[in-house]
Image: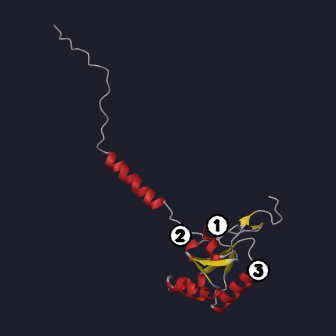
Amino acid sequence: MSKFKKKKSGALPAISTASLPDIVFMLLFFFMVATVMRENTLMIENNLPFADQVEKLDKKDLVMYIYAGKPSQNFKQYGTEARIQLNDKLADVKDIASFIAAERASKREELIPFLTTALKVDSDANMGLIGDIKQELRKVNALKINYTTKKGSVFGRN
């Protein structure tokens, strides 16, 4: 005679959580590597002007950024005149030479000729300030200048 077995209940077996810590750490490392940290805190208003003929820069690590514009709402104690921001501090035109020298010193010697200075200037900034910035850049022989803009029509129509 055959022996009959009792039917087991239809419940599913418990899910194994042995690999769960591995998955959590793998996700943690992925987000640590993929996240881009903001380099500078913007202390000025930076409403960029529009341009219809724009070109993307290839190597952003070879770009030095100079911001110009009026201080933003959180930094009104610095006045209402257009100011220059170098990295995370407001600066004067005479500080540009030391900024460029520090940026060049932080790069390898063979990359120095390829450094580009990007001007991120507010559309309402005074052109006299931009002229002074350009004069200071000429003095330190930083002649590769890029004006950062938004893509669009110059006349306000998209």
Number of on-image labels: 3
Among the 4 quarters of the image, the one containing residue 70: bottom right
Compared with 73, 62 (above or below) is below
Q: Is residue 82 left or right of residue 103?
A: right
Q: Which residue is mark 1?
A: 73
Q: Nearer the viewer, residue 73 or 35?
A: 73
The tag earlier along the polypeptide, 1 or 3, is 1
Q: Which residue is mark 2?
A: 39
Residue 131's disc is none
Q: CA distance from mark 2 to mark 1?
A: 20 Å
Other residues around mark 2 within 10 Å, as few (<14) / some (14–19) / many (≥20):
few
Element marked by disc 3: helix
The tag earlier along the polypeptide, 3 or 2, is 2
Of badges 3 and 2, nearer the viewer stands 3
Residue 127's disc is 3
Q: CA distance from mark 1 to mark 3?
A: 22 Å
Among the 4 quarters of the image, the one containing residue 89: bottom right
Element marked by disc 2: loop
The kind of residue tagged 1 is Gln
Other residues around mark 3 within 10 Å, as few (<14) / some (14–19) / many (≥20):
few
Compared with 82, 28 (above or below) is above
The tag earlier along the polypeptide, 2 or 1, is 2
